[in-house]
Image (cartoon, rainbow, N blue to C red):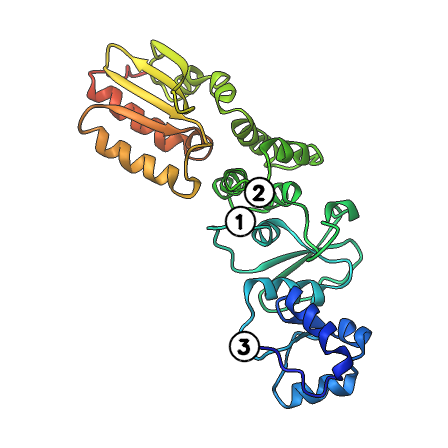
Amino acid sequence: MYAFDHVPAAVRTTVRQLADEQHGVLSRRQLHRVGVTRWMIAANLRAQRWRLHGRQSICLHTGDLSSGAMCWYAVHEAGPRAAIDGVSALEAAGLKGFENDHVRVSVPRGAPAVRRPGLMVRQTRRLQRTDVVPTGLPRVRVPIAAVRGALWARSNRQAATILAMTVQQRLCRAEDIAEGLLAVRRHPRKAFLEAVVLDLVDGAQAMGELDFSRICRTYGLPKPDRQVVRKTSRGRAYLDVYWRAFRLVVEIDGIHHLKVPAIVSDALRQNDLTLAADRVLRIPLLGLRIAEQQFMEQIRTGLAAGGWRQVAS
């Protein structure tokens, strides 16, 4: 519930509407614009009916800020040209299941990068007016936010997870992310992201183009007898790899049908169990992008269990 003491009755409806749209958090400038004076704000803060967050954000209640309220607090504090960006923008657009402990805000070059608890405000030359959604919370559009979130991720594993979750939760199409990635001219992670986006755009094509024999040579493993892309009646695409002499089958799964956060660790664990039994290993295509060495060591173990012995060089 919002408190409206010392607020003229004539403007209460407008203030309530703004509060409903912005999760209870308004800026001083917004309040002044609709007729709430500095004296009225000070009186409500002094009486502890409202609460000040940072320097510019007034919450019309004294409880904790929700995730939506944190976003409005972030843009109020960062300034009029600020926009929620990266994973924070994806969460504001509906992304679920990603752990994020701060709100990422982008401001143009030259704008002050304020410091506030729970916020990460960064200047960026990448921020363009057309990147931001035209109404509601100022946030970067989903495809661009996904690309930036992946560029800013702590690791390749986290970057791939951000892109895959965005597509799987249908926040945008993989093709839209691919288009957003075109704007990135140089970045150490660009080639990796291009590979992941290709997996997302067309998993079957990506697996068909995957030179698995080359990867095997890199790790000193024998060339497989068969490498065929197959599709099931339910639309699952996978790369079927087989070593006849060593009775080992490896199925490399596409990304679309899998639950991203757990697929790599689950596959590694399941393969450890399988190595003691039937020797049919399953590898997520994403796993080859971010945990190649661990999966190839499992294949080495499977081949050795089938009688293969590596010749000392």
SS at mark 2? loop
Q: Which label is found at residue 95?
A: 1
Q: Earlier in the sequence, mark 2 or mark 1?
A: 1
Q: Position of residue 229 (x, y in %)?
A: 42, 16
For the residues bearing labels 2 and 1, Cβ distance under 8 angstroms: yes
Instruction: Tell me the CA gap for discs 2 and 3.
Output: 30 Å
Q: Position of residue 206 (x, y in %)?
A: 51, 22
Q: Earlier in the sequence, mark 2 or mark 3?
A: 3
Image quadrant occupied by the N terminus? bottom right
Image position of 184 with respect to 49: above or below: above
Instruction: Tell me the CA gap for discs 3 and 1.
Output: 24 Å
The residue sitting at the left extreme is 277
Q: Residue at x 42, y 18 (%)?
A: 212
Q: Amino acid at mark 3?
A: Gly
- Quarter of the image for residue 71 reads bottom right
Image position of 234 with respect to 171: above or below: above
Image position of 94 with respect to 49: above or below: above
SS at mark 3? loop
Q: Which label is found at residue 171?
A: 2
Reading the image, the residue beneath label 3 is 63
Q: Position of residue 261 (x, y in %)?
A: 42, 43
Q: Earlier in the sequence, mark 3 or mark 1?
A: 3
SS at mark 1? loop
Q: Amino acid at mark 2?
A: Leu
